[in-house]
Image (spheres, rainbow, N blue to C red):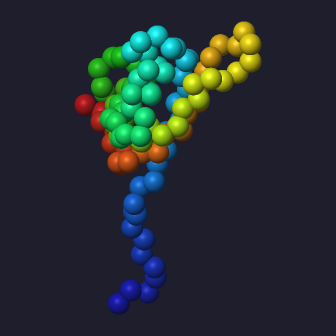
């Protein structure tokens, strides 16, 4: 007979915030984000371009692209975007 509460992992609710330098050239940041607008896309991240390992893990998930800040800042500022994406799948960490 149980005498205490037992807890288990529930549904994951994750977000990822990424900072971009805005670029309006074809196939660059703004065009890529606009093409993905309203869809769920695969996202993978690593610290460096070196092979995936315990010291350079690969993070994988899918994210909903539903917000951008194409125009941001003042005159003469470098155009940047800080975007928070909602994950539509668990974040998986691969080390090999």
Which of these two is toward me, 31 or 41?
31
Q: Which of the image's four quarters has the N terminus?
A: bottom left
Location of residue 9 in the rendering, given as x and y in whole percent from the top left corner: 39, 63
Q: Is residue 22 above or below residue 13?
A: above
Q: Which of the image's four quarters has the C terminus?
A: top left
Location of residue 63 in the rendering, given as x and y in whole percent from the top left corner: 40, 40
Which of these two is toward me, 20 or 29?
29
Residue at horizontal 34 percent and vertical 36 percent from the top: 41
Residue at horizontal 70 percent and vertical 21 percent from the top: 73
Tell me if 53 is positioned left or right of 6 in this view: left
Residue at horizontal 43 percent and vertical 35 percent from the top: 37
Task: Tell me which corner region of the image, top left, top right, bottom left or bottom right, holds residue 74.
Answer: top right
Q: Is residue 76 above or below residue 52?
A: above
Q: Is residue 27 above or below residue 93?
A: above
Location of residue 20 in the rendering, given as x and y in whole percent from the top left corner: 54, 22
Instruction: Please give the count of numbered marks on the rendered protein.
Output: 0
Q: Is residue 13 visible?
A: yes
Which of these two is toward me, 2 or 45?
45
Task: Tell me which corner region of the image, top left, top right, bottom left or bottom right, holds residue 34.
Answer: top left
Residue placed furthest toward the bottom: 1
Task: Tell me which corner region of the image, top left, top right, bottom left or bottom right, holds residue 81.
Answer: top right
Residue at horizontal 35 percent and vertical 31 percent from the top: 44
Q: Is residue 74 above or below residue 66?
A: above
Location of residue 22 in the rendering, given as x and y in whole percent from the top left corner: 55, 18
Q: Is residue 55 visible?
A: no
Tell me if 38 is positioned left or right of 68 in this view: left
Which of these two is toward me, 20 or 39?
39
Tell me if 74 is positioned left or right of 16 in this view: right
């Amino acid at each position: 007979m149980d005498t205490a509460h037992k807890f288990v992992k529930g549904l994951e609710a994750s977000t990822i915030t990424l900072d971009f330098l805005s670029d309006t050239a074809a196939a660059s940041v703004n065009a890529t984000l606009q093409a993905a607008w309203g869809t769920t896309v695969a996202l993978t991240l690593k610290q460096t371009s070196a092979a995936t390992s315990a010291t350079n893990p690969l993070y994988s998930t899918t994210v909903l692209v539903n917000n951008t800040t194409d125009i941001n800042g003042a005159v003469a500022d470098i155009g940047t975007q800080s975007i928070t994406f909602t994950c539509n799948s668990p974040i998986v960490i691969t080390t090999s």
